[in-house]
Amino acid sequence: MIHTKTFELRTSGRDDFVDITPKVSQAVSESKVSRGLVSVYVPHTTAGVTINENADPDVIHDILGSLDKAVPWRQGFYQHNEGNSAAHVKSSMMGCQATVPIEAGRLVLGTWQSIFFTEFDGPRTRRVIVTVTGE
Ligand code: ZN
């Protein structure tokens, strides 16, 4: 069985992490798949998706700070003429796809894990494509 769902979200700020776990869980519930995989795909070049801790918000703060330190927004350093190369690089560092197993109709996530949409050139309206496959 394959079930696909696309949803939109609005990010705030240039950089933003949005917990999309409830939306992905909802798509899994609607699919009626009890055992399988869910793919979370972000069709953008300056945003991404990652799975990390949602218990302590300082973790997200530290990830964003580390990415900024590694890939700063700088004039005159990058070639891409849109001026948003830092966002493109961070997008590739996070990746545009995450896969999570499904068991007993639920996402198999660790206690502290959540699925985050990662914005690097916002605020914008963005899309996420969720594909559930299994039985
Ligand atoms: Zn660009």
Image: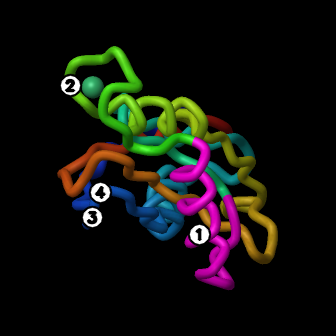
Residue topped by disc 4:
14
Q: Secondary structure at mark 3?
A: loop
Labels 4 and 1 touching (C-beta < 8 A)? no
Labels 1 and 2 touching (C-beta < 8 A)? no
First of labels 4, 1 by sequence position: 4
Whether 128 is drawn above or below 109: the answer is: above
Q: Amino acid at mark 3?
A: Gly
Quarter of the image that includes the N terminus = top right
- Give the residue at x 68% y 83%: 55
**From where the camera sits, is residue 18 visible?**
yes
Q: Secondary structure at mark 1?
A: helix
Q: CA distance from mark 4 to mark 1?
A: 14 Å
First of labels 1, 2 by sequence position: 1
Label 3 beta carbon within 8 A of ligand 1 = no
Q: CA distance from mark 1 to mark 2?
A: 27 Å
Specify the quadrant of the image occupied by residue 58.
bottom right
Q: Residue 112: give x, y in percent of width and height.
A: 75, 75
Magenta region, residue range: 52-70
Whether 95 is drawn above or below 61: the answer is: above
Residue topped by disc 3:
13
Q: Which mark is residue 82?
A: 2
